[in-house]
Structure formats: C-alpha cells, structure tokens
Amino acid sequence: MARFRTIRQRRHRARKGQVAAVATILGLLLVVTFLANFLTDVLPGEVEGAELTHVLAVESQVERLQAILVAEASHRATGAELSTPITLGSAAVPPFGPASAGSLSLEANPIGTQTSYTVSNVFAAPPNWNNGSSCFSGGSGHCSGNGNIDTWNTTNQNHSTFTLTVTGNHNSLGYNISGSNDTINIDWTGGDTGFVAFIINGSYDTVNYNKGGSDTTTPTANFEFFGEHDTFTFSPSGSHSAKGGMFVNVDFIGNLNQLCPSGNDSQTDKVGTLGTGGSNLLMTVTWWNALSYFSGPKAQTYPGGSGNNETIEWSNQSAPHGCAFTKTYSSHYQTSYASGLQVQLYNRVLPITSVAFDQGAVIEQQLGGSPIMVEPPPFTFSQAYGKPTAQLTLVSLVGNVGSEVGIGTADIVATILGVHTATLVSNTGLGSLTSLVYLNITTQYPAAWMNYFIAQSNGFPPWGGVCTPLTPIAAPYTCLNPPPGVAVTVSAPLFAQLVTITTVVVSLSIE
C-alpha cells in the first residue's frame, strides 16, 4: 500500500512553492507601487497640465469673441452672425484622469456698465463792458464812500494798468477784465468788506491785492485767471478779521478757444510775493488741468502767520470748468449696458477657474485668487488737437442665452443688432460735455477693473476709482475682494475733453 507524503517531506517541491508565492506578492507590490506613484506623482501633474492648457484655450476663445465683435462693429456690420466655439471640458488623461467639466452662461443681473455725464448748451455771456460805478471811472479810482457794490468790465485794453483804492467801509467789488499784459493793483484798507470778485481773461496778467483794515464780517475774495503766465500777489499787512476769518481763493484755470481747462496750461501761472500780516486768514490756490493730475490740498501756515488761524492751501485739480463769461443749460444722461459672459471651469487639480467676457474685457480668476484682466476692454486714449481724447467701445449683451454644462464644445452665436456712436467735446459750443464721463462697472471682479483704471493714468485718476458694495460685505471680505459670486460697483471718472462712445448691442445664443 502506497504512503502519502506531505510537501514538507518533498523538500524540493516545497521550496518551489514558497518562491512562487513570494514572487507573486513582490510582483503585486511592484504593480501597486507603480500605480501609487503614478496616481500620486505623475497623474496629478499630467491632469494639471491638461487643465492649464484648457484654461489658456478658453481664454483664447473668449478673446477671439471680443476681437471679432469689435472688428465687426467697427465696420458697422449690423445683422452679422459670428460664431465662436467654447471648449467646456479639459482633455482626459487615460486611463485614470477623466476630463474636467465646465459651464457657460450669461453673467446674472446686476452685472453691467452704466455711463453718466452732463451735456450742456454753452452760450457766450459777456458782461456789459465798460459799465461804470459810483466810485470808479474807467476801471481806476478811489472809493472812499460806504456801502457800495462797485463793478467794472473792460475788454481789449492790453498793456494797461488799473489801480483801485478802497478806503470806505462795507464795500464790495466785482471786476471782469479781458485783456493781456495788464496789471491790476488793488489797495484795500476799508473795513467790514463784503465780497471781492475778479475774472481775468487773458495771458501775462498780474493782480496785486493789498488788503488792510479790520473786518467784523467774513469777507471772501475770489480771483479766477483764464489764460497763461498769469501772476497773483497778496499782502494782508494791517488786515485784522474777526473769528469768522477772511477767505482768499485763487484759481488758475487756463483757456484755449473756450476749452477750460486746457491741458495743463495753468502750470505757467504762479503766485508771486506773499506779504506778511493779517489774522484769521484762509487762502487757497488751485491749478486746474485736464490731464487727471491731482495733488493736495496741502496746507501750511501762511508765510509770516502766527498759527493755525493763518493758513494757505495748495492743490491741483482736474475736471471740466466753465470758461470765462459763458452760461450753460445742462441735461444729465445715464446709459446702461447689460451683463457679460462667464465660463466656469471645474478643475480637479487646479482651483476652479472663471473666464469672463466682462463689460468688454476678458478676465480670469481662480477660486481664492485675485482676478487678472487678460485682455483689456476696447478703450484707447490719445491726444487730438491739443486735447486729451478717449474712444470707448461698450458691448451690451442681450437675449436669453441659457446655459450649458459638460465636457463638449459649446458654439456661441453672436448677432450684432446695432452700433451707435456719439462724440462729446468739452466746453466748445452746442452739445458740450460739461462734466466728467463716469464709468460705473458692476462686476464680480472689481480688483481687475481697479488695477486697469490705475494703469490708465492718462485717462483715469491715479487712484483708479471708487468701489461701492451693493450689499453689506462681512470681514474678511472687502469691496475689492468680495465673496465669490457677489457683485460690487467700481466707479471711475474719465478725464478726456473729447470722448467718442461706441455702443455695440449683441444678441447671444448657444448652439
């Protein structure tokens, strides 16, 4: 009878079985290690590369939509249908990296742009030239009486000198002088002054204002210079004002063919000698420009003053300003432009990313990051006929575009419904622009717009604009960094004296 033998009794076969089992386990460990290294080290990098390529592709596709809309609008191609593909999904990374999905939709209300500005009919309003007064004759003389309101208007008396002496009390004086190379000497020692108002329309003019006497009133003296190379000097020696104080306001405005201010022409104007003396004085000096240059007001103690009650403030301001001897009849306008287009990319490795066609600009933002303006809006800034100019193309998207989600390709069809252009010029006659054009951008990407405005220093102020939340925003979020999906408004004034606004109305659909 045969004996059964165990594996242990067959030593050679036993060793073979043990080796095979160990080899299988080691092989499986190698496979698992390879898969683990691939899934943790290689695959994320390849998926990230595919997603980054996808983000760049979508940015390029949205930029193409912007470019063809602007190009066709410049040719007034009303009715033209323009097709742009938008790839919603990223490329897959076989065998373990599926495609990341995306979605496409219009930005919801209240996303949009609003422009606001004032247009006026500007008419010449010259004073009644050479209108005499009870004290002065021919623009010169001595006023020793009390309680007078004295006026004089003169024109085209170039290279002339006007000397005005006021020793009476409770007097006021208004002068309009149009001419160049003139000198106006004002010697005012009377008390309880009312008002002093001078408009000087010309170049190389000089005003010397010597103010003495005691005032229990609160007198105000205004001097407006329209022209170039003008000079103002002031001496308050012997002037003593009550607690209400005395105000002296000097504005250098510049002028070019009824364009006020003109560039930065006022930089040629200056303040001459400032004499000492006086009490309770506030003097302001402002240079006006059309180049969005601001500074101040910077306050200092008036030269020779004794403390906080004698102050002079210096500043530069930029805004449209009425020219000398004009009158305006104004109407205020606001125009709204609707929404934008947003592509959401639901990445697996990279942060979720938004690519938006927002108010004509292309903006990209990763979740948790700061938005970047990939392609600015179609705005250009230049100089024409000595004026700062701006050309704005504003795109208004209308229609019920719906939405699409997935990994396929969405076809955006844009139909241009209308193109309208308006040109506005500052202070130059009928239909003049007499205020700044304000762009009010309601957006989910305020930091991108603010940075754009700051970078366009030849069109917008150095600080860019003002951010205003539509609803309260809780910390740690701010107006410039709102919570995801929350819209705020960035308002920026446009400093240009010739503005061309082109409105493109576009209907969108997805096919």
Image: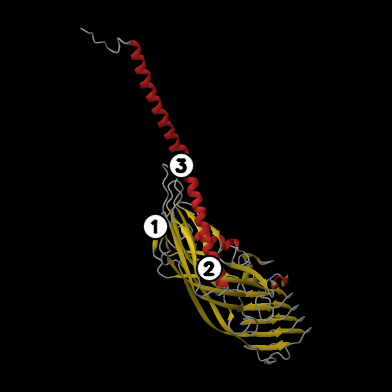
Q: Amino acid at mark 3?
A: Pro
Q: Amino acid at mark 1?
A: Val
- Residue labelled with disc 2: 69
Label 3 CA crowd tier, 10 Å (few <14, some 14–19, many 20+): some
Return the residue nearer the eye: 211 or 492. 492
Q: Quadrant of the C terminus?
A: bottom left
Q: Residue furthest right?
A: 159
**Residue 454 image position (x, y, % from top left):** 58, 61
Give whichever of discs 2 and 3 has the lower sequence position.
Answer: 3
Give the spatial CA distance, label 2 vs label 3: 37 Å
Q: Are marks 2 and 1 in contact (CB under 8 Å)?
A: no
Q: Amino acid at mark 2?
A: Leu
**Residue 469 image position (x, y, % from top left):** 44, 63
Label 1 CA crowd tier, 10 Å (few <14, some 14–19, many 20+): some
User: Which mark is on residue 149?
Assistant: none
Number of marks in the rendered image = 3
**Residue 433 image position (x, y, % from top left):** 58, 78
User: Which mark is on residue 405?
Assistant: 1
Q: Quadrant of the N terminus?
A: top left
At x 42%, y 34%, the residue is: 36
Give whichever of discs 2 and 1 has the lower sequence position.
Answer: 2
SS state under label 1: strand
- Residue labelled with disc 3: 44
Can residue 234 be seen from the camera position used here? yes
Label 2 CA crowd tier, 10 Å (few <14, some 14–19, many 20+): many
